[in-house]
Amino acid sequence: MYLQTSKFEVLSMIGQSSAHQVFKAQHNLTSQLYAIKMEKCPNSGQIENEFKVLKELDEIEGIPKIINYGMTPDNKSFLIMPLLNCNLHDVLICQELSLSQVLAIGLNIIETLEKIHLKQILHLDIKPENIMLSQTIQNTSIDQLLKPGFIQIIDFGLSQSLENLKNQKNLFIGSLNFASRASHKGEYLSFKDDLESLLYVLVYLRNYKLPWSQLISKEFTNSEIKSIGEMKTSLFNKIALYDKFPQEFLKFMSYIDTLKQDKIPDYSYVKSLFITMLQTKSSSQILDQFQNQTYISSIIQAINSETVQIPVQQNLSNQLSIENQLQEDIIENDDQMICLSDMIWKYSTVKIKSILDIKY
């Protein structure tokens, strides 16, 4: 079966950035919902880079599977992936997360990051908008939150191999709210920087903000990069970041702080901290059963048989035939962003009926 453009109905635009647009689409024959991610400008490179990274990470649960990849006639790359439920930023708008939920989310993400890092790949843009849920979190148990694949890390457009990063200095990579201190300084980045970004995400999920959030404007100036980086440095290991967490969270923060830049983290130790916090705050049967084990992989193995696999169609075409007609982007005159960040925001949907109605 081939996935043809004529068989897609575009239901809405669900997000966009300065570099790409994301559409919700439905296959007319199967009624399967997909996310179509397409770059705005030809040959920008981010989606091509993301495709290469996702191929490397294809067997990791917690990473979206590629349904299709190709190039439009006007040289714009696209990816087709399963449509997920919502991201953590949107979840926080609608409901408050308990401490146990935040810790379970963190533990699940750490398990996925470990597998990504074992491939010598860094994500470099961990933030709530890039952490998706496969289904609604409302009335979801801690056991369900810990299941592999329930939480998905998306948007690998900025990802790099560790080897490539050795040659990149004086470059800010990430988003102002969640980038590591080393990124603000333009230093060499490594595994610990993904963990530091995750730490900021978890603090954000508990506090609904970060201490430096009020310093961020839409300009993304070098001055902001410097001042926010300095504030992160001054507050790291301070109570403002861990006051709503158990003491083990401070140990997690201190471990990140003391970890050498080129050293791979001790994930067994990091996960043991989160398991300890969850054992105190949660009545999860899975955690009770494995209370004497430090590896969350034991938890994953115990519940792996219960994981629902989403079937992926095979033999999909390599290209979509999209009408080669130009019109202005929906957002005109996007400002050049100093930081290499993929900032997605909500877009008020226009009435798009078919993928052929999308003009570039």
Image: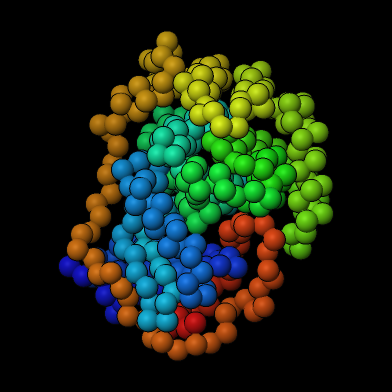
Is 271 left, or right, of 72 in this rendering?
right
> Do we see residue 140 in this rendering?
no
Q: Could you tell me residue 331's position as x and y percent?
A: 62, 76
Please state which of residues 96 and 112 is positioned toward the viewer in this rendering: 112
- x and y percentages locating residue 248 in the rendered image: 62, 19
Q: x and y percent of residue 269 in the render?
A: 51, 19
Q: How is the image coloured?
A: rainbow
Residue 115 in view: yes
- Residue visible at 44% across and 39% down? 120
The quarter of the picture where residue 76 lies is bottom left
Is residue 299 rendered to the left or right of residue 94?
A: left
How far across and down, in percent of the image, does residue 304 sit?
A: 29, 31
Q: Tell me which residue sits at (78%, 59%) in the image.
A: 221
Which quadrant would the N terminus be assigned to in this image? Answer: bottom left
Vertical side of 279 occupied by 93: above or below: below
Task: Tell which of 330 and 118 is nearer to you.
Answer: 118
- Describe residue 299's horizontal placement relative to residue 245 as left or right: left
Q: Is residue 244 left or right of residue 326?
A: right
Image height check: is 1 above or below 311? below
Picture mark count: 0
Residue with the most extreme top position:
292
Q: Residue at (45%, 69%) from the top-left corner? A: 38
